[in-house]
Image (cartoon, rainbow, N blue to C red):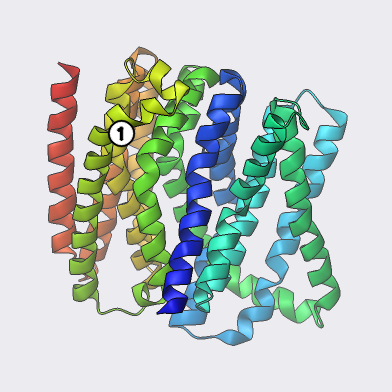
Amino acid sequence: MKKGIFFLFVFGVCKGIVFFTPLLLAETLTLNDYGLLEYSLAGLGFFLNGIISLGVPGAIPYFLIKVKDKNLLNGFKIHPIWLSLLFIINILFFIFNREGIEYALVITVAYIISNQIFYSTKLKSISRSMEAVFVDSFMYISLLMVYVLINLNVLSNNIYSIYYALNLYALVYFIKACITIVNISSFKNAFRHYQKILKYSFHLLAGSILLFAITTTGRIMVEYFFDYEKVAVYGFFYRLAAIVIMIHQVVNILFFRQIYSFELAKLDKLLAWFYGGVYLLSLLFYFLSTDLIGQFSGFFRTNIDQNKTLYLILSCQMVMWIATAMNSNVIDRENLAKKNNRKLFLAVFVFGLVLLFGGQQLSLNMLCFVIFVLIFVSAYLQLNTLKQNSIIFRSSKIVLSSCFIFSSLLIFLELI
């Protein structure tokens, strides 16, 4: 009991830092610098992480929990070494091109996120949930330190201070990778096991890229069709709406092993109740926050009147984002990534055509609604993949469809 309460306390503190730190930086940085930070943290940097991770984090619970093949553990030791090559390239790139800060920051963030996900997934797979929470949150803890130092006039109030601070944190992972190299007893044997892991994770890699393209495309598309200042506005309201994702993270950490072992019919009912509860909380927070947040945030007061519809769309979108993440766990568990990737590729392809021929005519609100539709369709396609393999998540499908229809009605009423 005491351990559970202490875990919730640690989780609350860590995820509170994750939630509030970017919002605090929005009040401090210029609009352009904050837009660049958002673009890196949860846009292109997060998407790039999906590529360089090679799908390996998704292979960890499969081999350790479902297959229970612990002989492959030394194969996972190769992964941080591979990631560290990116760190070296990024440092060299910035040394010779200091004007390329936007690219250097994206790569630094991608390197950090890929390491955090890798190590936290290993910890969750062996039920070390508290350490996993800390690892997942430490980039934002670093950013909070930067925020404090900026306000104490120790650091300059610009994007370069953030870049240098994050590279100091990234250096920790690089040093850890170097130590790993020294401690590998048989590099040849470890590399052979790593190749076996990659054979499985290849299909997870494709799925990860597609899912990251779907769920992180917002900031990337906003920057492409508009500018970093619009990314700043989008990112700020996205983070406000994403407060419910902390609930998803609690569930995903505490019940991570159960997701890979629960009886499927029971899992469907539990997820359906979970999605319904998260959706109602999202709407509740949206309606309450429009009056409350403005008392504490100048950024909110300045931008809410012109972006209330945007905020509503993002609030409705969160349950679909969570559904794609939870469905992805089930698909990985059942080794159906390859079959699901074909459907996700088709969804991304159609989405790309819509943006290619109509993106320039879309307003920010309509662009975000199109993304909302894409994420819902992706969650629906995941459930369809399960159904085609005799795994029927009927309750989840009903709840998500109902949430989408009701959300579309709310958004339509807000627009007219």
- The quadrant of the image that shows the N terminus is bottom left
359 versus 292 height, above or below: above
The residue shown at (74%, 81%) is 189
**Residue 70 shows up from this direction:** yes
Residue at 79% x, 52% y is: 171
Give the residue drawn at x 44%, y 35%: 217
- Residue depicted at x 56% and y 19%: 31
Question: Which residue is label 1 attached to?
Answer: 289
Q: Position of residue 260 (x, y in %)?
A: 37, 75
Q: Find residue 412 and report its image quarter.
A: top left
Count of numbered tags:
1
Q: Examine the rendered structure and indicate whether residue 151 appears above or below residue 247.
A: above
| Residue closest to the eye, 320 or 246 | 246
Q: Is residue 104 visible?
A: no
Q: Amino acid at mark 1?
A: Ser
Q: Is residue 405 left or right of residue 125?
A: left
Q: Foreground residue, 47 or 390?
A: 47
Looking at the picture, how far across and down is residue 71, in whole percent? 62, 86
Residue 5, position as x, y percentages in the image: 42, 71
Find numbered disc 1 in the image and state the secondary structure of the residue it sits on. helix
Q: Is 51 drawn above or below residue 124 in the view shown?
A: above
Q: Residues within 10 Å of mark 1 (few under 14, many from 20)?
A: some
Q: Which of the 4 quarters of the picture holds residue 172?
A: bottom right
> Is 70 on the left-hand or right-hand side of 221?
right
Q: Is residue 221 left or right of residue 56?
A: left
Vertical comparison of 187 with 350: above or below: below
How far from the left and from the top, in percent, is residue 188? Answer: 78, 78
